[in-house]
Amino acid sequence: MSSKEHKHNHNAAEPDAKTAAEGTSVKAEDGAEQAENQELKQEDNTKELLEAKDQEINRLQEQLKRVTADTENYRKRMDANFERRVDSAKEDIFRKLLPIIDHLEMAIEASRKGGTVESLCQGVELVLKDAIKMMESYAVVPIEAKGKAFDPACHEAVMMEESDELPDETVSNEFKKGYKIGDKILRPSMVCVSRNTK
């Protein structure tokens, strides 16, 4: 090959090398640009994700505030409702006490005007009937005691007496009546308990 041909081939190879180098350079630039675009897309996705999470957090915080406010309002309504029910129960009890007070006042007035002991007793009996009626309206009942087996859950022994007639641990006498409402003891009966001597 002559030197002219070699130069010509060399010159012909140069544009190919330049074109190849330019192509590689363009590919590298394209690759860098793609990487940069990918990075920007990831940043945008991250920003969108963070914004979505922030919105979700704000929504949940608002929801929590509403639920907290609703709960507080419900508690206030329940407290007010409870107070109304307590007040209503008090009114009911005291309304039922009024006839008892009326009868006591009449008995006292009658005795002061020279009424007999009999009329005073009748007045007191009326008061007792009213009181029992009122208690029964609230399901308050007397505890059975006399002649029953002693039960420390509803009887309080204040005295013991020996007896040939009653079995051991039997209530022989009742000094003060006990009362219960349902299964709850309001006051135990004050009783005397027998001790059998046989």
Image: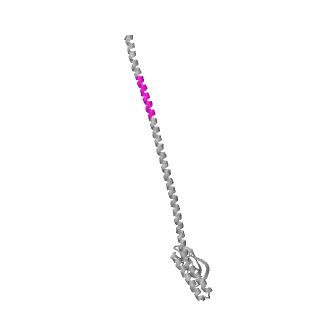
Q: Position of residue 106 (x, y in %)?
A: 58, 83
Q: Position of residue 182 (x, y in %)?
A: 51, 73
Q: Is residue 33 magenta?
A: yes
Q: What color scheme is it?
A: one colour
Quadrant of res 4: top left
When the figure is inspected, residue 25 is found, relative to residue 48, above or below; the finding is: above
Task: Pick the residue in front: 165 or 173.
Answer: 173
Quadrant of the image containing the N terminus = top left
Q: Main secondary structure of the magenta part?
A: helix
Q: Is residue 109 magenta?
A: no
Please report the bounds of the magenta region as a residue range: 20-37
When the figure is inspected, residue 167 is found, relative to residue 41, above or below; the finding is: below
Q: Position of residue 112 (x, y in %)?
A: 62, 86
Residue 174 visible? The answer is no
- Which residue shows up at 51% across the image and 63% down it? 78
Task: Pick the residue in front: 145 or 134.
Answer: 134
Q: Position of residue 93 (x, y in %)?
A: 54, 74
When the figure is inspected, residue 40 is found, relative to residue 119, above or below; the finding is: above
Left or right for 7, reference 191: left
Quadrant of res 90: bottom right
- Which residue shows up at 61% across the image and 82% down it? 161
Quadrant of the image containing the C terminus = bottom right
Task: Pick the residue in front: 134 or 178.
Answer: 134
- Which residue shows up at 48% across the image and 44% down it? 51
- Number of marks in picture: 0
